[in-house]
Structures are given as C-alpha cells and as structure tokens.
Amino acid sequence: MTISYQKCGLSDISLIQETGRATYKPYYHQMWDIGGVDWYMERCFGKEVLEIELGDPNIEYLIPRNEHGQVIGILKLLLQQSTPDNS
C-alpha cells in the first residue's frame, strides 16, 4: 500500500476537524462522562484551537491518504518539545 501525506494549512481546518472527529469519537466516546467527548473534540479540533496551532511553526498536521486518495487518518506533529525533567 502506498501512502501519501498532505501537509495541512489554514485552508484545511474543516478537513482536520472532520477527520479528527471521525477517527476519535466513534472509538473512544465510552471513555468519557456525558458531554466529555464533545468537550475534548472542541479542545482538540475547535476552529480557534486549530487556527492557533496551524499558525505555530512547531506544530504540523498531516493527512495520510491511500493510493486511491482516501483519507486514512490524521497526524499531529510537535516538531520540538523539551523532555520532562524526571529528577
């Protein structure tokens, strides 16, 4: 299987939202109290949140697609992050 990756920008917010919600909510909703999963979806995929993150040069969103162009997931990359101090 050949996988290609689309780097996302501000014009891709609706694609990120749709993909993120479709790949999380159906599979993890049972882990949350009532209303919790909706809060989490807004916290991770709300328009304002994504606008800020897409403007951050340290964060990248990628949409992987199969050889037929079908979206198969979502990747959020933090390009630089300090490691926790375990001392």
Image (cartoon, helix red, strand yellow):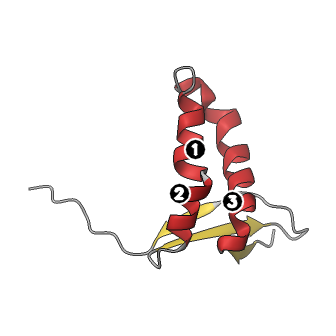
Between residues 11 and 16, which one lies in front from this camera angle? 11
**Label 3 SS:** helix
Q: Residues within 10 Å of mark 2 (few under 14, many from 20)?
A: few
> What is the three-letter code of the residue carrying label 1?
Glu
Q: Residues within 10 Å of mark 3 (few under 14, many from 20)?
A: many
Q: Quadrant of the N terminus?
A: bottom right
Residue 37 visible (yes or no): yes
Identified by mark 3, the residue type is: Ile
Judged from the image, the secondary structure of the residue bearing numbered disc 2 is: helix
The residue that label 2 is drawn on is 49
Q: Are marks 1 and 3 in contact (CB under 8 Å)?
A: no
Residue farthest top in this picture: 34
Q: Residue furthest left?
A: 87
Q: Earlier in the sequence, mark 1 or mark 3?
A: 3
Say which residue appears at 27% left-offset and 69% top-offset: 82
- Is there CB contact under 8 Å for labels 1 and 2? yes
Quadrant housing residue 76? bottom right
**Residue 81 placement (x, y as % from top left):** 33, 69
Which residue position is annotated with label 1? 42
Name the mark on residue 16.
3
Callout 2–callout 3 Cβ contact below 8 Å: no
Mark 1 Cα shell of 10 Å, populated few (<14), some (14-19), many (≥20) = some
Residue 8 visible (yes or no)? no
- Mark 2 or 3, nearer chain start: 3
